[in-house]
Image: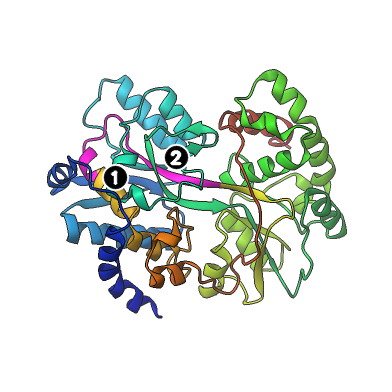
Amino acid sequence: MNRFTVISALGSIALACSLCAPAVAADWPQIEAQARGQTVYFNAWGGGEAINAYIDWAAKEVQARYGITVQHVKISDAADVVKRVQTEMAAGRTSDGSVDLMWVNGENFRTLKNNKLLFGPWAESLPNWGLVDLNKPVRSDFSVPTDGYEAPWGTAQLTFIADKVVTPVPPRSAAELLAFAKANPGRVTYPKPPDFHGTTFIKQLLLELTPNPAILQQPVTRQAFASATPALWAYLDQLHPFLWRGGKAFPASAAVMHRMLADGELKLSITFNPNEAANLIASHQLPGTAYSFGWTRGTIGNVHFLAIPANARAKAGAQVFANFLLSAPAQAHKADTRVWGDGTVLDVSKLPPDLQALMRTKAPGALTESVPTLAEPHASWVEALEAEWLKRYGTR
């Protein structure tokens, strides 16, 4: 089945999927009517060509179906959007904010929720909520209950990338990574926190090395941090001298690492999309011998979400767009590795056979092995870990 056949079939599949969904919320027709003609300013990461193309496709779909204009505001850090919403609300701009919908999770969601900067609850009243797989962590964001204030959009899991020709046997634990780095000095690294991938890598190490991982699911305290992190810092002290540039400098992003892997400068790269290597192979950014792998005891995985600020102008349009992004056609198109390859939040067993087959197809280079998913630490650990990492290693 080629991409154009898939897309042309999505319209008829949507009708079949409507049989799986719950009854439409009583006021949903009113919300759709109010949304028509609105412009939704969707603040979302703009650093990935495949993601940008997908958002452009979705914008055209909702324009044709619902008369909504979606403007993709390309951002590099969701924390900047959070600060903008905070500033607007503090200045009394309570109803005509510049952000209508944002791609968010983790500590940024926690900040917005704790400061009552979110519209809602709304997510579980969407018509397509009935398709969501409730066995996935769609009601908890980095151990913070979502309470209907954000809608799930996709799934992700920390994944490593290597080249079979260069690295036929990859490291599958923190201990093996240390041994691998010592055997290949200068050929291993990770992005510099607070880059998202770099921070996630630090959390991955912490989950494996801390003597009591359960403590990470609770809000961080000074005492908890002091008891949970010494093994992490001892490990990094051993690892860093064997890293690229002796651990005195770090790549700015995972995208930079991908290029270094392709150039042979590194032996490993990192991603939070188990299908990204397949996309990079298809776009000739990595060789066809690239492959994805995880660690034996599992890697961090989470759900990423969509949220509406309390001062959004186009709340109705934002809800209709979010509902479309949660639909079977949109989720199937997003899951296609030739499009984006982002994991679905839907219960695939509820979908028609054609879509089930599409979502379960794996392209060369994608993660095919079963890797246990480890829960994210509570969102409050992120800031504490980044601050301590920068204090110890950021100024070398």
Q: Residue at x 58, y 67 (%)?
A: 366
Task: Decide: few, some or many residues near mark 2? Use Cα within 10 Å; few <14, some 14-19, many ≥20.
Answer: some
Q: Residue at x 75, y 53 (%)?
A: 244
Magenta-drawn segment: 302-317
- Towards the viewer: 137 or 91: 137
For residue 387, what is the image quadrant?
Answer: top right
User: Mark 2: which amino acid?
Assistant: Ala
Q: From the viewer's perspective, is 16 left or right of 221?
A: left
For residue 371, what is the image quadrant?
Answer: bottom right
Residue 351 lies, with reference to residue 225, above or below; the image says: below
**Disc 2 designates what residue?**
78
Q: How many marks?
A: 2
Q: Residue at x 60, y 71 (%)?
A: 365
Residue 164 lies, with reference to residue 272, above or below; the image says: below
For residue 205, what is the image quadrant?
Answer: top right
**Residue 183, image x, y percentages:** 87, 59
Residue 156 visible? The answer is yes
